[in-house]
Amino acid sequence: KDRTAEEKKSLINRLSRIEGQIRGLKDMVENDAYCTDILIQVSAIQAALNAFNRELLSNHIHTCVADNIRAGDDSVIDELTATLQKLMK
């Protein structure tokens, strides 16, 4: 899929922040940080990944899914449903 420059920049910025959070988490473990502090950081990372997923899913629905439905390809609905089921595990 071709993403707009704005969409790509937003997604990459989110991933860069998550990457930084992961590095920070690794440092916390290496430096024997308190377990509760590590767990809170993991929760923040999970929230950041969820936000990334929401943005990407929204973009997907507004572009790929909508375009395919407009073109008469309803199979994309089954694909979206399967994707949502995987995300909700």
Image (cartoon, rainbow, N blue to C red):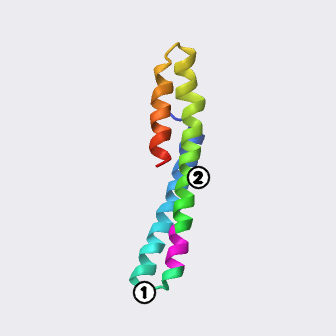
Secondary structure mostly seen in the magenta stretch: helix
In the image, taking residue 89 as reference, residue 40 lies left or right, namely right
Q: In this view, does 75 lie above or below 17?
A: above
Q: What residue type is labelled 1?
A: Asp
**Quarter-wise, where is residue 29 in the image?**
bottom left
Disc 2 to disc 1, C-alpha distance: 28 Å
Can residue 67 be seen here? yes
Residue 21, compared with residue 81, is above or below; it is: below
Disc 1, SS: loop
From the image, tell me which residue sits under label 1. Answer: 32
Give whichever of 68, 81 is nearer the camera. 81
**Taking 55 as reference, is 44 above or below it?**
below
Q: Where is residue 75 in the image (x, y as percent from the top left)?
A: 46, 21
**Residue linked to disc 2:** 51
Which badge, 2 or 1, is on the more N-terminal residue? 1
Which residue is pictured at 46% across the width and 49% down the height? 89
**Residue 53 x/y as whole percent:** 53, 47
Instruction: Report the magenta residues as a range.
Output: 37-42
Toward the viewer: 84 or 56?
A: 84
Instruction: Kindly state the secondary structure of the residue where label 2 is placed.
Output: helix
Residue 75, placed above or below residue 34: above
Identify the residue at horizontal 59%, vertical 44% (top origin): 55
Question: At x 52% / y 27%, what residue is drawn?
Answer: 64
